[in-house]
Image (tube, helix red, strand yellow):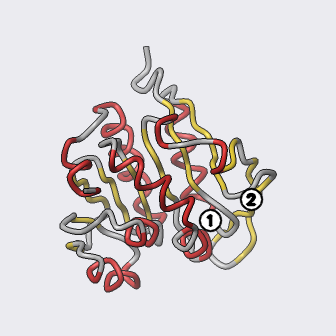
Amino acid sequence: MSHLTGKRVAILATDGFEQSELTEPLRVLREHDAQVDIVSQDGGRIQGFKHFDKGDTVEVDHMLSEVSAKDYDALVIPGGLFNPDALRVDDQALAFTRGFFEAGKPVGAICHGPWVLANADVIDGRTLTSVPNIRRDLERAGAKWQDDEVVVDKGLVTSRTPKDLPAFCAKLVEEIAEGRHRGQQRSAA
């Protein structure tokens, strides 16, 4: 039996996601037998980017209006500049994100992905990392920022950039296998 058999993971993304930050966690989680769904604001396909250049599109499995955090064991938020910027002002995306924290479920966010966490009001008192240029935004939301390839804080896994993906994915698998974290629930209160 594989590491994540029976686990269901949502990857929350929209147009403008950094391609490798969605496709690499997707690949690794599926290799560990997790069921992974791409969840977005709308159905159809969403556009990936390789930094500033258009990359591949990815099929959306479920729209936000069709699912809730109760349907999943964990959440992953890829970065890219445009993806988290759109999601962090979407009330449905923020409520979906908060639901994982309220239930104590593992959450992973990379690059600009923690912007969504800041706007969901779930990082006050948490230690995390991100792409350095959103550090101040995260600190203003109450987070303690560290410049490390991966930071894990009670079920919250964060990383900086695509070069950190191996460490990010390894810790994601570990945290999802562990399951619920009480410290995650306290941060959502």
Q: Is residue 166 above or below residue 124?
A: above
Which image quadrant for residue 163? bottom left
Instruction: Name the residue rendered at 20%, 52% in the picture.
Output: 186
* Circle 2 SS class: strand
Tell me the amino acid under the disc marked 1. Answer: Phe
The amino acid at mark 2 is Ile
Q: Position of residue 99 (x, y in %)?
A: 42, 49
Depicted 110 relative to depicted 170: above or below? below
Circle 1: element type: strand
Estimate the x, y position of residue 162 in percent, counting from the top left: 48, 64
* Residue 104 drawn above or below residue 5: below
Residue at image location 61% in from the left, 40% down from the top: 37
Task: Find residue 15 and report its horizontal and vertical position in percent.
Answer: 70, 66
Residue at the image point whose x is 60% and y is 50% from the top: 23
Residue 32 is situated, as x and y percent measured from the top left of the image, at 47, 29
Gap between marks 1 and 2 measured at Cα? 8 Å
| Image-based side of 118 in relation to 184, left or right | right
User: Circle 1 sits on which residue?
Assistant: 17
Which one is nearer the viewer's eye here, 22 or 85? 85
Which quarter of the rendering shows the C terminus? bottom left
Q: Earlier in the sequence, mark 1 or mark 2?
A: 1
Of the pair 94 and 15, the residue shown nearer to us: 94
Q: Quadrant of residue 19?
A: bottom right
Q: Is residue 181 left or right of residue 171?
A: left
Which residue is under mark 2? 46
Hey, which residue is sitting farthest top in the picture?
A: 1
Query: Decide: marks 1, 2 in contact (CB < 8 A)?
Result: yes
- Give the total number of marks visible in the rendering: 2
Location of the N terminus by quadrant is: top left
Question: Which residue is drawn at the image coordinates 73% and 52% (left, top)?
Answer: 58
Q: Which mark is residue 172?
A: none
